[in-house]
Amino acid sequence: MFIPLKTDETWIEIHDSIDSTNTLAKKRAIEGVGDCYTVVAESQSMGRGRNGRSWHSPPAVNLYLSMVLNINQAAAGIATLMGAVAVMNSVKQLCPRPELVQIKWPNDVLIDGKKIAGVLGEFLSERPDCCVLGIGMNVNANISDLPDSPRWPATSLSIHLGGDLDRNTLLSSLLSELRSLRGTLESDRDSILEQVRKNSATIGRTVVLDSQNSGTIKCKAIGIDKDGFLLLQGPEGKMTVVAGDVDIVQDNGYY
Ligand code: BT5
């Protein structure tokens, strides 16, 4: 059970069980809540990922939250990356080997190559000046709490670190990272992008781009540009990926 945080209680709404924190945060955004308003839940019955995928959300072991950001469209491209950086920074503080915590473009946080968190940025047609940033983080999940056949190998912080963590402390640290990065999103997006580049699990790797026009193409990830888009060297030259699915080819050849 979450206990209310000591500070800023007014902007955090906490639920035991909910369909999706992103769905409720979108509703709150339309109702006109302020910047950084956050919805947190102990479990989700319809937690979602990108492109219609689902997010496995067992009760009382992980973190599921969504933050409303009143941001202009120019900052939209890096909002998801900002969420990933916030998760990464909170997790690095807990890890004896922080270099193992990396971002897999555009929305996954990995620890020692396995996914511990995913970020879902969604925009609202009703409020084009607004983004809802959803974060799911595997904290105290044990192996049986993880999804059966995830797209990418999954783990939790407790599995990696070998002991359970206080989720309230982690939530507090994550919210303060998010609010601090939020403060720089429009004024100093380069510092966010630099953190993504420095801690990227994608740059330098062979990736497979699922292109709607030309099927799958194998490329090398060569960088992340000033808008947060992925730069690829493909068989026919350089390409910029704005969104969509890019899978890293794993050591065993699978992607
Ligand atoms: C994501 O999508 O990684 C974004 C996940 C965002 C979830 C949060 S929870 C709070 C908020 N409210 C919501 O409804 N959503 C957000 P994507 O890159 O599409 O990855 C989804 C894929 O990850 C799935 O198809 C599974 O293979 C895998 N997966 C599902 N649950 C997982 C988990 N708990 N841990 C690791 N992998 C998981």
Image: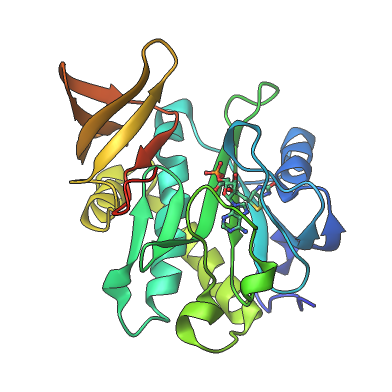
Q: Is residue 162 left or right of residue 30?
A: left
Counting from the top left corner in percent of width and height, residue 96 is at 33, 85
Residue 167 x %, y %: 64, 78
- Residue 212: name its quadrant: top left
In this view, 208 is above or below 111: above
Position of 31 compared to 35: left or right? Answer: right
Q: Residue 91 location in percent, x, y?
A: 44, 72
| Residue 148 seen from this side | yes
240 vs 162, left or right, is left
Which quadrant is home to the C terminus?
A: top left
For this rendering, which residue is in front, 48 or 94?
48
Height in image: 229 above or below 111?
above
Q: Quadrant of the N terminus?
A: bottom right
Query: Is residue 225 shown to the viewer in this render?
Result: no
Front-lying residue, 130 or 247: 247
Outermost residue to the bottom: 163
* Vertical relation: 110 (above or below) 125: below
Name the residue nearer the viewer: 234 or 60. 234
Residue at the (53%, 52%) spot, across then down:
118
Residue drawn at the location 28% of the way across and 54% of the way down: 251
Residue 205, located in which quarter of the rendered image? top left
Seen from the viewer's position, the closer of residues 183 and 192 is 192
Residue at the spot x=68%, y=71% of the render? 144
